Structures are given as C-alpha cells and as structure tokens.
C-alpha cells in the first residue's frame, strides 16, 4: 500500500530543501554544503532531462509557467517571487539563482554554471559513499542522450559511455526514441543499466510479424520494471516512458511501437508487484511531465513515490497526492544536470515509514570534477572541440529559451528562418531544452545546443491565415488543456513576423486572437502567407536549421528589437507569470 496520510504528515516538514546553500558559490568554503544528515536505510538518487549536457551550463528557469484552472497557483506553476515564497527560499541566495529566473545575469556571474557530468560524478560518489553502495541506487528519468551536437552526431553513444561511468542503474526514455530502433537498441546493448518502459507496446502489425519485444505474450516492447535489493529491502522501480512519442515526433522513428499513459496497465503491474513479488516500496521513474504525474498519482494506488521528468520543473519539495490506497509523493528534478534529487527512505515491516527528499543544485564551482569522468568528456569532445568552439557572433543580451511563450534565443531563430528563407512568417517549436548564453561570444556549440535533433530540416511553404491560427490553437490547447492527460509537453510555438493575443483560460478555438503582421496589418483567414519553419513531423527535404541559424548569425548584426510577439489576457493575478518570456 502507499504511504498513509498520517505517515506523510509526520515527515512532510522534513522533506524541505536541506539547509542553506552558501550566499556566494564562487570561492566559497564548501564545508557542509552537500553534507546531508544520515537518515533511513535506503537512498535513491534521481537525475533527469540532462539533454546530453556533459559540461556545466547556464540555464535560466522560466519567467512564465502558467497554471490554468485547478493548477493555478500550484507547483509546478509558480515562478519568481511566488516560487521563493512557496518554498521558503531567500531572494539573494544561491538557491534562488538555481530555482528561478530572478536577477539571472547578475546571479550567473556571482554563482557560476551548474551541472556537468564530472561534477555530478563527484557529488554522486559522495552521496552514495555516505550511506554505502549497497544502500543506494542511481536512476535517470530520460532525455539523457539528446540535446547537443555531439550527442546528435554520435546518436547518443557518447552519453551511454558517460552514463556507465556515472553508474546509472536504470533509466526510461523520450528523445532517446528519436534515434530510431536500431540506434536505440544498439545503445542499450552497451548500457550497463536497465531500460524500463511499462507503457510501450508492439503495434498489432508488429506483433503479427513477430517484431522484437521484451515479452511477446503481453506485447511489451521493453522491460517494464525491476526489483532492487537495497539495504536488505526490495524496492521496485517501474519505468514510464514519454507517452506521446509518435505524436510529438515523426512516427517513422517508432513504427512498431505504440505508446500511452496506460494507467490501467500500470495499476495491474503495481498490484502484481505488491502481491506476488512482495516488494517493500514502489517507485515510478516517470517521463510523463509533472501535471500528468499529479493526475496519475490520484488514479493509481500503490505507488509510494513518483520520480518525474519531461517538463523540466525543479520542485524542491515533493507534492503529496491522495488516492484510494493512501498518499503518493510526486517529484520533478529539473533539467540540464542542474539538480540531483536525493530520496532517503526508512523502510520497516514491508513498507515505507518515513521519507526525506532534497533537490540539490549542482554548483560546479563547489565540486571538484571527477578525473576519470573529465578524461572521458575530453576524449569524446576531442575530434570536434575546435568546431564547437568556433565563434559565430557576439550577443549583446542574455539568450534563453525556456518559458511558455517566447525566449530571446527563439526570437533569433525565427529571425534567421525569415531572413534566410525569405519568408513573411516563421514558426519555431517550443522545445524546453536548450541552454542559456550570457552576453558575449556565441559559439557553434551554443547553436547546436538549441537545434540538434534528428529531423532538423527547414521548410518554406504557403499557409492561410486560418491554418496559422489553427496551428496556434492546437498547440495552445496542448499546453493549457484543463485535463493533464491531454497535455503532450513542450511550450508554445515561437513566432516571427507577426503578433497575437492569447487568453490561456479560454477553451479550444477561442484562445488565439488579434493576429497581426509586424507592419500592423491583420492576418486574413483566407489569405496565404510564406511561412518558414523546422522540425516538422513530416519527412521533408531542407537545409538543417543549425546551418541556417549559423549562417544568419555570421552575416548579420543582432536584431534591435526584443519583443515576445504575444499579448496575454486573463493572467494578471496568476503566480505563474513574472513578466512575459
């Protein structure tokens, strides 16, 4: 059974972010920063959505992460000062820099970059040695293999080497599937851990043709779960891959597999592991996204903790969700290697009796890089290091992507699409990965960190004003549908060449209005326009977007404007907005 409500009330206060990180990371005394008080008899470390970032990075958290309806004002839909108040974090602290967008440029100079696998390795080894390897487990929530030019060129093989050295024992997936089945299975053969995905099945046609599967009888394409002995206790880890892979990405990458949330199948699996396998605890390693996990936790009983990913939400404290069996704790551990989740469990008499959870920012300047991991990174980067270091241009502003509606990096990509393809309008996908760049040099590595995917082709086609509005409405519904099970991840499509008004709390077909070209003329429903874009799910031929983007930046000055192109209505009192971005 899951954690009972009265049990949760006993330890919920202890689940807060541990201690205070130093007010100044650079050059600070590191004594005690990552010294966690010993607790419990099993420790699970959780990382997710690193997007192949082997090196420390800057990553600005969103200034707009709107919750609509029942989700308004609830984590993860809090930003800026509302976030700090909810989680009791000082505004001038290193934690505020890690978890919010506030004073990002000044704080970035003050506290430095976060993440980096060499630094993660040092922290992970420390936290595991504190409790003993036999009492600890390292899990990855997916989006591990994609997000850099190097990972894209090597189809994730570099990240498999890094994961093996890091000691990841189980993972699930999302962007991993976009390398296609052959590359995916090749990487998994070299991966020393286990790949878990209870919600991926063979299609009927693939099953009829005896396609490869973990279990032909059930049709499951991959192993659904594993049981780990930790400190003498049996802990089940169930994998939940991203449910919408064939919708969000070209279906040609996964023609034999069908995905979905599949909470009915999940409930059956949980019940079987409780009854037949006699496990002491069940952890769901999820790539659903936090809103989906919160709903799933209310519908599926028997899961103790959901270690979540996909939506890149860094949430310092777990959220308790009641269900028929008790309470399930839901977490989400950020992105880009910025954070490491530490779940300490006290297990007794066949169940979890107490929990402590901490989401630790990984300040690279407080952690000595592990020598073996740094050597591996240097070897992997060596052949392309000079190409990655090429200076493309100099930016006069902070460049970032993450945010529900726009980002300065995406505005530049839209400018490049319009300029290079001679288009009136540009559409750029609202991907949540992509690092931030402080004012100064912009390198080819930075360009690839925003664009490196396996379907990067740009396109130019004519669309009517009606079609453009329909696209915006569809994506907006995906982002703000009141039912989380209809939210398929990602932020709003970025636009260039026109502006529009969005009312997120409205219903499908009524959120988007007042579409106007940059010259002020209204976009007419029946008129056609030249539209440029990239990352289409259709199989198109076109110049890779990184080449288009780099060519544009090499030949042109930075744009004078700094606008989002979006006017929001009905969100003035929403704590998920701290300025449009």
Image (cartoon, rainbow, N blue to C red):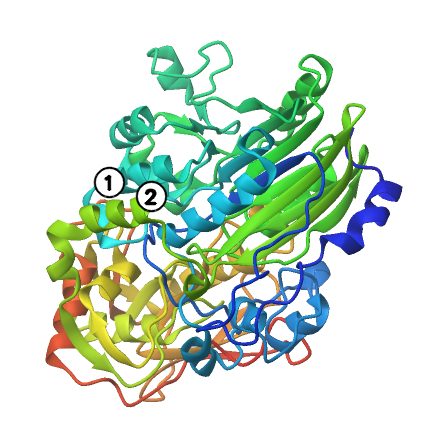
> What secondary structure is marked by label 1?
loop
**Quarter containing the N terminus:** top right
Measured as percent of width and height from the top left, residue 504 is found at 58, 68
Q: Which residue is denoted by mark 2 in the rendering?
A: 145
Measured as percent of width and height from the top left, residue 172 is found at 46, 35
Chain-order first, disc 1 or disc 2:
2
Q: Is residue 240 left or right of residue 86?
A: left
User: Which quadrant would residue 298 be assigned to in this image?
Assistant: top right
- Position of residue 20 relative to residue 367, above or below, is below
Q: Which residue is denoted by mark 1 in the rendering?
A: 155
Q: Residues within 10 Å of mark 1 (few under 14, many from 20)?
A: many
Of 530 and 344, the residue lying toward us: 344
Of 411 and 461, the residue lying toward us: 411
Q: Residue at x 66, y 19 (%)?
A: 273
Q: Residue at x 29, y 50 (%)?
A: 374
- Position of residue 434 relative to residue 227, above or below, is below
Q: Residue furthest right?
A: 6
Q: Residue at x 60, y 38 (%)?
A: 131
Measured as percent of width and height from the top left, residue 405 is found at 46, 70
> What secondary structure is marked by label 2?
loop
Q: Residue at x 58, y 51 (%)?
A: 332
> Are circles 1 and 2 on residues that touch, CB within 8 Å?
yes
- Position of residue 379 relative to residue 219, above or below, is below
- Examine the rendering and report whether any part of residue 296 can be seen: no
Q: Is residue 368 left or right of residue 154?
A: right
Q: Residues within 10 Å of mark 2 (few under 14, many from 20)?
A: many
């Amino acid at each position: 059974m899951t954690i009972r409500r009265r049990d949760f009330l006993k330890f919920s206060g202890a689940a807060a972010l541990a201690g205070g990180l130093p007010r100044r990371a650079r050059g600070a005394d590191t004594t005690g920063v990552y010294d966690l008080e010993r607790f419990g008899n099993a420790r699970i470390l959780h990382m997710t959505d690193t997007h192949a970032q082997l090196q420390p990075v800057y990553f600005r958290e969103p200034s707009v992460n709107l919750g609509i309806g029942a989700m308004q004002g609830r984590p993860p839909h809090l930003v800026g000062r509302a976030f700090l108040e909810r989680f009791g974090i000082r505004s001038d602290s290193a934690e505020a820099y890690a978890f919010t967008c506030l004073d990002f440029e000044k704080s970035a100079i003050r506290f430095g970059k976060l993440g980096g696998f060499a630094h993660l390795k040092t922290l992970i080894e420390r936290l595991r040695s504190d409790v003993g390897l036999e009492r600890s487990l390292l899990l990855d929530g997916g989006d591990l293999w994609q997000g850099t030019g190097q990972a894209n060129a090597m189809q994730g093989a570099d990240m498999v080497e890094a994961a093996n050295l890091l000691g990841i024992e189980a993972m699930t997936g999302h962007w991993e599937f976009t390398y296609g089945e052959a590359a995916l299975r090749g990487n998994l053969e070299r991966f020393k851990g286990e790949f878990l995905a209870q919600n991926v099945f063979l299609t009927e046609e693939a099953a009829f043709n005896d396609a490869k599967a973990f279990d032909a009888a059930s049709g499951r394409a991959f192993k659904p779960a594993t049981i780990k002995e930790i400190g003498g206790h049996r802990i089940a880890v169930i994998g939940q891959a991203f449910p919408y892979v064939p919708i969000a990405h070209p279906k040609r990458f996964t023609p034999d597999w069908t995905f979905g949330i599949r909470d009915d199948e999940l409930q059956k699996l949980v019940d079987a592991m409780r009854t037949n396998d006699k496990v002491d605890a069940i952890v769901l390693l999820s790539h659903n996204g936090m809103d989906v996990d919160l709903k799933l936790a209310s519908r599926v009983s028997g899961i103790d903790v959901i270690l979540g990913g996909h939506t890149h939400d860094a949430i310092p404290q777990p959220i308790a969700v009641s269900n028929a069996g008790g309470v399930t704790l839901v977490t989400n551990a950020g992105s880009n290697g910025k954070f490491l989740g530490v779940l300490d469990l006290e297990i007794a008499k066949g169940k979890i009796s107490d929990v402590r959870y901490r989401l630790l920012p990984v300040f690279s300047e407080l952690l000595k890089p592990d020598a073996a991991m740094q050597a591996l990174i240097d070897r992997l980067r060596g052949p392309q290091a000079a190409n990655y270091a090429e200076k493309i241009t100099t930016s006069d502003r902070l460049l970032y992507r993450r945010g529900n509606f726009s980002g300065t990096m995406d505005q530049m990509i839209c400018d490049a699409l319009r300029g290079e393809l001679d288009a009136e309008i540009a559409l750029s996908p609202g991907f949540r990965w992509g690092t931030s760049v402080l004012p100064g040099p912009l390198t080819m590595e930075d360009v690839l960190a925003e664009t490196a995917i396996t379907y990067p082709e740009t396109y130019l086609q004519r669309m009517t004003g009606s079609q453009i509005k329909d696209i915006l409405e569809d994506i907006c519904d995906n982002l703000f549908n009141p039912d989380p099970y209809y939210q398929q991840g990602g932020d709003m499509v970025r636009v260039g060449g026109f502006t529009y008004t969005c009312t997120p709390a409205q219903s499908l077909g009524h959120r988007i209005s007042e579409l106007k070209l940059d010259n002020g003329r209204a976009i007419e429903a029946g008129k056609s326009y030249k539209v440029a874009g990239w990352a289409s799910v259709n199989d198109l031929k076109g110049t890779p977007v990184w080449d288009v983007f780099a060519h544009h930046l090499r030949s042109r000055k930075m744009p004078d404007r700094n606008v989002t192109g979006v006017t929001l209505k009905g969100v003035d009192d929403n704590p998920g907005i701290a300025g449009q971005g």
